């Protein structure tokens, strides 16, 4: 297993390098001069030079990249053009909110998706199967933010079971955290539940037809045992393979869903950064997101290796 | 018998495709004619009429600025249509040529572009779009360029994979040899192969872009106010939710219905491409005519371990009817005996084995007859009762050892699990016994091999493991379904020897299913020859070889390759086994038989006691020993 982790980590180096180059090159690609953006229309030539110096824009772009990368590696992502707050602080303040939301919705997606997928696969062509398949197709067509609006209208505004907006950190009050995260996580998790249900169903149906399942039954093992041990472990292999992809989608979707619930996560930070052309902030948000995605990929790779002996390096 | 239903695929595909395309065509018409169809100007404000519920004047009510929701919905549809087509077009135009190029060129170009694509894909899609919008600035067309760039990665990978698959194809090589330029090869040979997956990817992308555009407009990065789009309408709805919750309904439903239609159409396209564009399948008339049991009922003898009497098995056909695959099958196996079940593929040998275990599956069932195992009648048993019998009383070894062992567990684990569940052993005991069994079936270094996964073992070794597992609970009957067919010839003999040794030690009876008479001669005491779902001859192995009485048996014997017989060509039986639905009512072999006559068209019964034959001419024709 350690070798697998090592192999994956080495494979990540070129990826992280390219992402960092892409992220850094936003500066060069952005229209207009960031210095003008900071000092405004009324800035003097002296102010201009000063800001240019402060931003380190007098050095060649390649050395600027390495300076930026070196600082980023130490956790310094620069300061916001807009309000001079360190980018790392701003991102770290918002990150737990977005991660909470993404994690809970991923959990919901896995639970709902697996339950629906397994139920459908075990009763092919039954009403359960039809319902699950239809639900999965519908679930993938419903915009997460619209589903969020409906949930708020019904469960928050009408029934008042949940708060309509806002987010309570887990450390403040676990109960209030759960209340504040439930609706947005449901809204966000819907389409991934649907995607996972489809994947689980087709993987299970495929595995159920395998010789080794019939052989296990021929050996007198009960249907329940065969389904939940022999079938599931094999069927989970393709599911885990799509899981990291789904979590990446959830992380992106969280940015939108946060807006419905007025949750101050990475989403509102990113959107205001775009509106203000706050380059360091955008760079920071992208870089941190990529790190999270990479961490998720590594984790799912580990699970994949555990489930699928053929994937382990020998 | 169930009533015949229509072929489920085509009917349901049309049931989906027709409404989905109707909705999309309607959307196109409404979008084009928005100016004439919409009752109001979508931007016209009237604050006195703000936030009204649906009425005869404003069918879907008004928003916070008194604008007509229906009109905004119609113009929003135009935006949705144009923007999704725009982004998809950009994605195709960017992705396909680049994908074709790197796929064709390969090498450094391919490597570099693919790493770039991987990097982009590892960032959440919405975030990539947001970053591109940061560079281009907010606005619908800029947002669509952003989404186009984002989704071009999917088209790039698709085009590249098609090129990689096609460029090795023989005809591409051939075209290069006759001097066609590389551009012509790309265009003439590769593009037609790209078309089907490309169409599917386009539908998927349109659906995804519709959702993404709505999301971006919702957060204010797409369509800018006061422009009407479904996403901006939902933004307004979210703000005024407490005052007029209905505002969220029309744009939301519009998105769902449109995306659903596009996705369903994509699913139908994918399914029909996968099946080679739907063709209607002729419903087959169910054949219900088959022989009732013709043999007299007999009771199992005291020393019979298995006694099957008048067995009939039917399976479901796709049109919902049932047809028999085994009829009037009777035989018995004595304790410690090895009975061969011989015949070509499709004669019902494997189904017979699975019937004994009660594992025919959901598609089939036993309709007549008895299966008596060790004086217990199995056909009436519940699933739970069958689970008790399986493994303990009767076990099975399958044809292909590499697929009959679970790839996700170690082989030792798979044997030990049976011992724990069926024998109630502890984990430790079960593992120790599993290692013993692995040793017993002739595998060296058993403790180490027990920890191996099936893919780490050779076919012969995997079959030994499967045999060890089957014997782990000392069954009285072992069903071996072509256990040597998938193995190398040199390994086959070793496995047969193993069966013999194990039978001496464990004393179980074996039902040995094989199509190979040479194998049967090697290991069986007695042989049942099956043809088209029924028993045609049964005899002791020596007797069968010396004096075959059924023309089919004689045919099988003469088709055996024999080392001393170098005379080519090897005789074969003309024709093939008829599929169960097309069985003749009389002798099922008559169509392939050299001796058939008019009388063979009637129902033929099995005659004889210790040795049996199903042929009316058995006593008059002399088949002799053909080898």
Image: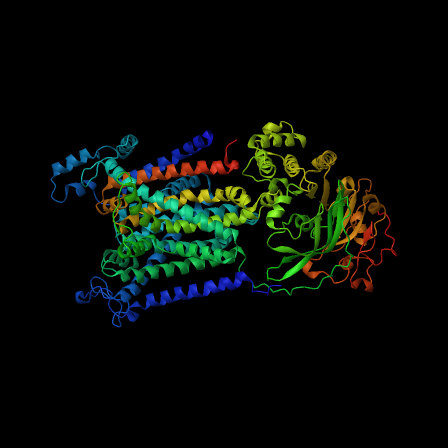
Is any atom of residue B158 visible in this view? Answer: no
In the image, residue A167 lies at what x, y percent?
26, 45
In the image, residue B367 lies at what x, y percent?
67, 57
Q: Residue at x 28, y 46 (%)?
A: A267
Residue nearest the viewer, comparing B431 with B425? B425
Classify the position of the N terminus of chain B by image quarter. bottom right
Q: Is residue A24 above or below residue A184?
A: above
Colouring used for the render: rainbow
Q: In the displayed image of the protein, which residue is found farthest to the bottom?
A: B56
In the image, residue B445 lies at what x, y percent?
62, 27
Residue nearest the viewer, comparing B18 with B386? B386
Q: Residue at x 70, y 61 (%)?
A: B582
Q: Is residue B377 above or below residue A64?
A: below
Q: Is residue A92 above or below residue B321?
A: above
Q: Is residue A203 left or right of residue B542?
A: left
Q: Residue at x 44, y 32 (%)?
A: A5
Residue nearest the viewer, comparing B384 with B591? B384
In the image, residue B277 lies at what x, y percent?
53, 59
Residue nearest the viewer, comparing B464 with B309? B309
Q: Is residue B194 left or right of residue B130?
A: right
Q: Is residue B120 left or right of residue B567?
A: left
């Amino acid at each position: 297993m350690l070798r697998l982790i090592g192999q994956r980590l080495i494979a990540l180096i070129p990826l992280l390098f390219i992402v960092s180059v892409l992220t850094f090159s936003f500066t060069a690609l952005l229209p207009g001069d960031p210095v003008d953006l900071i000092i405004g229309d009324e800035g003097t030539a002296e102010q201009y030079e000063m800001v240019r110096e402060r931003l380190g824009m007098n050095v060649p772009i390649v050395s600027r990249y390495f300076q930026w990368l070196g600082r980023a590696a130490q956790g310094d992502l620069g300061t916001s053009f807009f309000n001079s707050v360190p980018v790392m602080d701003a991102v770290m303040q918002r990150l737990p909110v977005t991660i909470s939301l993404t994690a809970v919705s991923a959990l919901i997606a896995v639970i709902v998706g697996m339950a629906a997928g397994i139920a459908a696969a075990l009763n092919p062509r039954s009403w359960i199967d039809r319902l699950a398949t239809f639900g999965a197709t519908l679930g993938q067509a419903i915009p997460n933010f619209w589903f969020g609006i409906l949930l708020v209208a019904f469960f928050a505004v009408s029934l008042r079971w949940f708060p309509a907006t806002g987010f309570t950190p887990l450390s403040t009050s676990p109960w209030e955290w759960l209340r504040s995260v439930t609706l947005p996580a449901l809204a966000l998790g819907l389409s991934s539940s649907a995607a996972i249900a489809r994947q689980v169903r087709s993987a299970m149906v495929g595995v159920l037809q395998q010789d080794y399942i019939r052989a296990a039954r021929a050996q007198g093992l009960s249907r329940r045992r065969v389904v939940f041990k022999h079938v599931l472990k094999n069927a989970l292999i393709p599911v885990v393979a799509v899981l990291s992809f789904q979590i990446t989608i959830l992380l992106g979707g969280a940015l939108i869903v946060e807006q419905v619930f007025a949750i101050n996560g990475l989403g509102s930070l990113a959107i205001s950064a775009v509106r203000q052309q706050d380059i360091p902030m955008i760079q920071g948000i992208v870089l941190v997101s990529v790190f999270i995605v990479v961490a998720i990929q590594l984790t799912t790779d580990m699970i994949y290796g555990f489930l699928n002996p053929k994937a382990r390096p020998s | 018998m169930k009533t015949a239903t229509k072929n489920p695929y085509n009917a349901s595909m049309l049931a989906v495709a027709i409404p989905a395309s109707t909705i999309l065509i309607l959307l196109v018409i409404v979008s084009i004619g928005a100016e004439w169809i919409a009752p109001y100007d979508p931007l016209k404000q009237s604050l006195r009429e703000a936030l009204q519920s649906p009425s005869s004047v404003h069918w879907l009510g008004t928003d916070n600025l008194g604008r007509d929701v229906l009109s905004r919905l119609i113009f929003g549809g135009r935006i949705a249509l144009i923007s999704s087509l725009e982004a998809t077009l950009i994605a195709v135009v960017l992705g396909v040529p680049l994908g074709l190029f790197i796929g064709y060129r390969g090498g450094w170009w391919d490597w570099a572009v693919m790493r770039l694509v991987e990097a982009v894909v590892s960032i959440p899609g919405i975030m990539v779009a947001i970053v591109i919008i940061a560079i281009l600035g907010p606005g619908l067309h800029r947002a669509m360029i952003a989404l186009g760039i984002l989704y071009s990665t999917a088209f790039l990978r698709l085009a590249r994979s098609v090129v990689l698959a096609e460029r090795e194809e023989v005809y591409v090589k051939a075209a290069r040899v006759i001097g066609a330029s590389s551009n012509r090869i790309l265009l003439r040979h590769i593009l037609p192969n790209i078309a089907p997956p490309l169409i599917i990817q386009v539908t998927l992308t349109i659906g995804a872009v519709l959702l993404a555009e709505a999301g971006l407009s919702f957060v204010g990065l797409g369509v800018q106010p006061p422009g009407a789009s479904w996403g901006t309408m939902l933004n307004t709805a979210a703000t005024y939710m407490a005052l007029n919750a209905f505002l969220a309904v029309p744009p939301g439903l519009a998105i769902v219905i449109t995306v659903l239609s596009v996705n369903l159409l994509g699913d139908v396209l994918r399914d029909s491409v996968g099946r080679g564009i739907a063709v209607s399948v002729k419903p087959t008339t169910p054949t219900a005519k088959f022989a009732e049991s013709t043999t007299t009922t007999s009771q199992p003898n005291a020393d019979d371990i298995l006694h099957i009497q008048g067995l009939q098995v039917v399976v479901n056909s796709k049109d919902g009817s049932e047809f028999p695959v085994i009829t009037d099958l009777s035989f018995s196996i004595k304790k410690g005996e090895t009975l061969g079940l011989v015949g070509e593929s499709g004669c019902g040998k494997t189904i017979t084995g699975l019937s004994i275990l009660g594992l025919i599956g959901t598609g089939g069932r036993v309709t007549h007859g008895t299966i008596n195992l060790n004086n217990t009648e199995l056909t009436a048993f519940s699933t739970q009762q069958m689970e008790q019998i399986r493994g303990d009383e009767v076990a099975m070894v399958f044809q292909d050892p590499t697929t009959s062992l679970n790839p996700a567990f170690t082989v030792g684990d798979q044997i030990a699990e049976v011992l724990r569940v069926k024998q109630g052993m502890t984990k430790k005991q079960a593992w120790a016994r599993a290692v013993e069994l692995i040793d017993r079936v002739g595998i060296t270094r058993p403790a180490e091999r027990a920890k191996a996964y099936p893919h780490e073992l050779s076919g012969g070794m995997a079959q030994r493991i499967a045999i060890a597992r089957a014997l782990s609970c000392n069954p009285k009957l072992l069903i071996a379904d072509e256990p040597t067919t998938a193995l190398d010839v040199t390994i086959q003999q070793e496995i047969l020897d193993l069966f013999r040794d194990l039978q001496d030690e464990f004393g179980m009876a074996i039902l040995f299913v094989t199509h190979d008479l040479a194998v049967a001669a090697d290991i069986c005491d007695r042989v049942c020859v099956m043809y088209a779902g029924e028993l045609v001859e049964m005899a002791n192995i020596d007797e069968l070889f010396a004096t075959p009485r059924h023309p089919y048996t004689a045919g099988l014997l003469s088709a055996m390759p024999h080392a001393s017989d170098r005379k080519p060509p090897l005789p074969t039986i003309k024709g093939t086994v008829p599929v169960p639905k097309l069985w003749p009512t009389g002798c099922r072999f008559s169509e392939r038989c050299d001796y058939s006559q008019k009388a063979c068209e009637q129902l033929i019964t099995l005659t004889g006691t210790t040795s049996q034959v199903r042929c009316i001419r058995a006593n008059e024709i002399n088949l002799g020993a053909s080898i």
